[in-house]
Image (tube, rainbow, N blue to C red):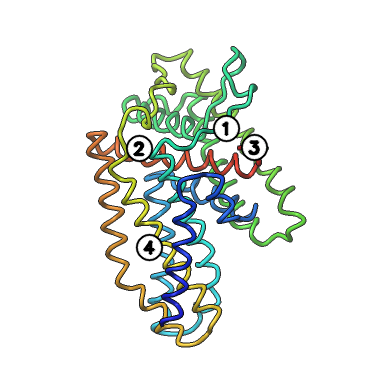
Amino acid sequence: MAELEKEIIGSWFEIKSNTENIINLRDHFDLTDIEIKNTIQKLHESVEEGIIEYKKKIFAKPFSIINSLNFDATAMPLLKEVSNDINSLTYVILLQRLIAKKAIKLKISQDQEDNGMEKHYSIGEVGEIIKEVQEEIIKHPDLKSNKNVINILIQVQKYKKELESIRKILPNLPPDKQENFRINSKNTINDILSKLVASYEALLKETNITQKNPNTQSVFETYDFSPIIELLKKQAEISDRIKITFAFADRERFKILETVRTLKTLEEKIKESLKKEYDYYHSVSLSEAGKRDVSRQFCLEAIKVLEKQSEAIF
């Protein structure tokens, strides 16, 4: 295992020397367009607990593989896939760390500024709209028969169906057809969200529902995240260790189970680290709902960075 440990140490040394600058970090990881799109998709799917949910899901995969290898070898073809997913996770964690340090500034194009034109809602704001409407339905059950509420719920189902379609179809398409599929899917999702927002604004006009202000101060302006910066760095180091170990096992094809089993001691450390991170979100926001909102905001900020990277307009 000496050769493996040497690779792990070397890999983290290279990453650590690039952690403080977004351009250096981006160039070091050099994710493909497909890897970035897939990561964005996984982050979008983490709607309940945001960045914590995303990290839990990706961190769980290698340990699931390790457990399955105890019984048979059917999971061996997944070693490379898991290694790639974990590599993207390491990158996201280090982006999150830079976000927490307020070290990332995204350029905003002129057409994104508010010039009195039609309001555009982010995915996060649409999520808050859905949550608000669901809360109003609980308080006022008769709203279920309101045509605008009905349409909002229909659009929510269409949105979920479209995401599921993307998840199932995109990975199986030939590379030359993936971009057109993504463009068509994006247009479909934009149409769905536009209809949802139109129904929501119509609902506001005809009822006593008060629109929540989506432009409240950012959690990154409100809270101090410096206490978790070192925690995130350690998460990234663990993540990279997993990535290198799985890549090594896939490449060497020798004593695979023995190799990946060396990671089992990290499983509890990861759970403790994520719990500590989530607990910190609770301590600054002072509520269960608040900690989930903080985690979702980290997720949305990571998505913005990745989308800008994908468009190559940092």
Disc 2 from disc 1: Cα separation: 23 Å
Q: Nearer the viewer, residue 63 or 146?
A: 63
Instruction: Please name the residue that numbered disc 2 is placed on.
Output: 294
Disc 4 from disc 1: Cα separation: 38 Å
State which mark lies toward you, 3 or 1.
Answer: 3
Earlier-in-chain disc, 2 versus 3: 2
Per the rendering, the mark at residue 257 is none
Disc 2 from disc 3: Cα separation: 26 Å
Determine whether, in the image, residue 69 is placed left or right of residue 30: left
Amino acid type assigned to the residue bearing label 2 in the image: Val
Determine whether, in the image, residue 92 is placed left or right of residue 115: left
Q: Residue at x 42, y 18 (%)?
A: 211
| Quarter of the figure that contains the N terminus | bottom left
**In what element is the residue under mark 2?**
helix
Instruction: Please name the residue that numbered disc 4 is placed on.
Output: 238
Q: Residue at x 41, y 37 (%)?
A: 297
